[in-house]
Amino acid sequence: MPGFLMPAPRFAPMDLAGDPIPGGLVHTYASGTTTPLPTYFNADLAAIHANTNPVVLDAAGRCVIFLPPGVTYTIALETALGVPVWSQDDVSSGPFFNGTDVLGTAGETLTAGKVVYLSDGSGGKTPGRWYLADSANNYSSTSPTIGMVQFTIASGTAGVIRTGGTVTGLAGLVAGTTYYVGSGGALTSTPPALARVVGVADTTTSIILYANPARLATNVPITQSTVLTGAQNNFALTPGVGILYLDGANIGITGFTAGIDGQRVVVINRGAGPAPSSVQNQGATSSAANRVITLAGSTVPGFLTYLAFGAGVFEMEYDAGAARWRMITHDSGWITPGYVAGDFLGNGAMTWTVDAGDVITSRFRVTGRTVTYSFSFATTTIGGVANTNLRIASPQWGDGIIAAFVYHNALAFANDGAVRAAYVRAPASGSALELTTTAATAWTLVVNAGYFAGEIVFEVI
């Protein structure tokens, strides 16, 4: 790093003959005006350390003057008797080296000690100007470049914004405490919903700023867990949460408290089973702004999106324009429904008896809008009057799920006393998958001799 030329530690102006001016008067004005502007005799630039204006030179014709960064002055020198000697416009200091200072234009009056942000035009503000930061809006708190004002800047004029390092001259801070963007440019130690860290106080009168770009509040929990069970309306999300763990058994959520535009939350089901948890599409029992538009069943209010215990996961993003959570990814994990004898049927007067011990596999998985159902049954009984369709009711492959179109998949194995060429069919409406022979002939009546195995993949409405 190069060295720097030492500045004159004391200001010692000369008259036109090059001689000192004991008792001389140094007037300081806003540049190009006769409006008095203060200078300081201490580097902290505190109001109690302001010089008199004019500054009176000592017996040797010297004085100490500190100028705030980014402020431009007119300096006018007079003799002790008030006779003008010289005047100079556009005098300013360089920026302090203990922070990152930028010269910005105020979009409104910015008073010393306030937190400010650089506008992108949101909220009807002028792009490229600085305004008081406010936790009420994402654009004025969590997302923009922020800084603090050490010296008041009038609306429409340029001044120095500190975006890093240390800001001094404050009051009422608690050393070691993290501070956030509050209301109207104020600092707050209580994280609001739109929590943006400003910095940490190192003394009661100064704060060390976090560097930009945007930094969300680090001590607001980014994870949340719940052991709630059963139906939950308007589930309360912790502000700023990014991951929600479901640790209870069989929770059914109809909606989540509204987030901020663009907020994403990953929901992971770690809870106990055996039944899956679920989130409801456009759940009517939650407030409108808290509802979820799911991937599967997005056209069917109340449609359940399943989450296998210990495996199900989905991600959602809040859309403030639509005032809804939008599901953007979903994987239910493999779900094994409970055995119910009535889920296995024959059409017409035909019966199909699948005992609990006959079920080798019956499980389904929903990934986005795609359902995969795998099954394998052994030693089943086909009775009554022989007919064409054996049926598996929807509780086995997702209660309430409706196929978007008619789907056919070949059965891996079908044996009702003789190996058959057959397929499994998902109808576009209805609540049962159909097992049908390729020739659409009747199944053979058998006792504990019906074997069936297959898998079908289909899209959900």
Image (cartoon, grey):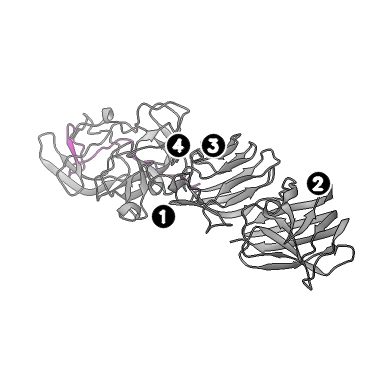
- Name the outermost residue toward the bottom: 439
Cα distance in 3D space between marks 1 and 4:
32 Å
The residue beneath circle 3 is: 221
Q: CA distance from mark 3 to mark 4?
A: 18 Å
Q: Of circles 1 and 4, which is in front?
A: 1
Question: First in sequence: mark 1 or mark 3?
Answer: 3
Instruction: Specify whether 367 is left or right of 291.
Output: right
Mark 1 or 2, closer to the camera: 2
Residue 283 percent location from the top left of the image: 50, 48
Q: Quick check: 119 left or right of 360?
A: left
Q: Residues within 10 Å of mark 2 (few under 14, many from 20)?
A: few
Crowd class of label 3 (few under 14; some 14 to 19; many from 20; radius 10 Å)? few
* Residue occupying the point 61% across, 63% down: 429
Q: In the rendered image of this protein, does residue 440 appear above or below residue 145?
A: below
Q: Would you identify the image quadrant in which residue 120 lies?
A: bottom left
Q: Is 444 on the left-hand or right-hand side of 107?
A: right
Quickly name the residue at label 1: 321
Q: Secondary structure at mark 1?
A: loop
Which circle's residue, 1 or 2, is located before the other in the chain?
Answer: 1
| Residue annotated with mark 4 | 199
Magenta: main secondary structure equals loop
**The disc labelled 2 sits on which kind of residue?**
Ala
- The disc placed on residue 356 is 2
Of pointers 2 and 4, the one earlier in the residue sequence: 4
User: Mark 2–mark 4 contact, CB under 8 Å?
Assistant: no
Determine the secondary structure under disc 4. Answer: strand
Pick whichever, 91 or 344, lies toward us: 344
Q: Residues within 10 Å of mark 4 (few under 14, many from 20)?
A: many
Residue 331 rendering spot, x and y as whole percentages: 65, 53
